[in-house]
Amino acid sequence: MVTKRTKGRGGTGRTTPKGAITGSTSSRATKSSGRAESSARYTPPTAADLHAPSRLWVPVLMFSMLGLGALLIILNYVGALGGVNNVWLIVGLGCILAGIIAATQYR
């Protein structure tokens, strides 16, 4: 009866030896280019990238959409757009919603 081996060569299952420094590139350097191979691990963005200020168009879009939406609703109820119509109300609320969505991108 043949038994099935669960681990190769009877080792502990480690790929790198215990206590080895994972950032060491001396064993990964290629002979032709002399550069280290890129790692397959995920590298999170740096803190400078996460807290970068917003571009100028974000607050401009945010305030213009909020203002346009409020203006459309006010003009609808005053009757300046040809009488009270629910279409202008929906468009105004949509503009306000677009302004709120733009506000979530503001840093």
Image (cartoon, rainbow, N blue to C red):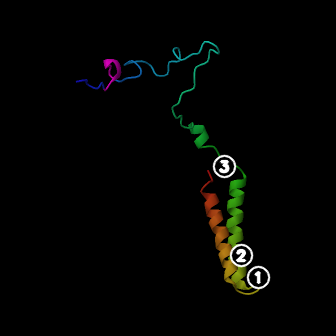
Mark drawn on residue 81:
1
Q: In which quarter of the image is residue 19?
A: top left
Can you say which quadrant of the picture contains the N terminus?
top left
C-alpha gap between disc 2 and disc 3:
27 Å
Give the crowd class for mark 2: few <14, some 14-19, many >=20 residues within 10 Å.
many
C-alpha gap between disc 3 and disc 1:
35 Å
The answer to whether the residues at label 2 and label 1 have Cβ atoms under 8 Å apart is yes
Relative vertical location of residue 58 with respect to residue 1 in this rendering, above or below: below
Query: Quick one: SS at disc 2?
Result: helix
Determine the residue located farthest toward the front in the rendered image. 1
Residue 38 x %, y % = 57, 26
**Which-is-in-front pick, marks 3 and 1?**
1
For the record, the magenta segment spans 6-12
Residue 72 x %, y % = 71, 75
Question: In this orientation, which residue lies closer to the viewer: 19 or 12?
Answer: 12
Q: Residue at x 34, y 18 (%)?
A: 9
* Label located before the other in sequence (3 or 1): 3
* Label located before the other in sequence (2 or 1): 2
C-alpha gap between disc 2 and disc 1:
9 Å
Q: Is residue 12 left or right of residue 78?
A: left
Query: Quick one: SS at disc 3?
Result: loop
Give the crowd class for mark 3: few <14, some 14-19, many >=20 residues within 10 Å.
few
Question: In this orientation, which residue lies closer to the viewer: 53 or 86?
Answer: 86
What amino acid is found at the position of numbered circle 1 in the picture? Leu
Q: Name the residue under label 2.
A: 72
Q: Mark 3 points at which residue?
A: 54
Residue 45: say if magenta: no
Relative vertical location of residue 7 with respect to residue 57 in this rendering, above or below: above
Q: In this view, does 69 lie to the left or right of 2?
A: right
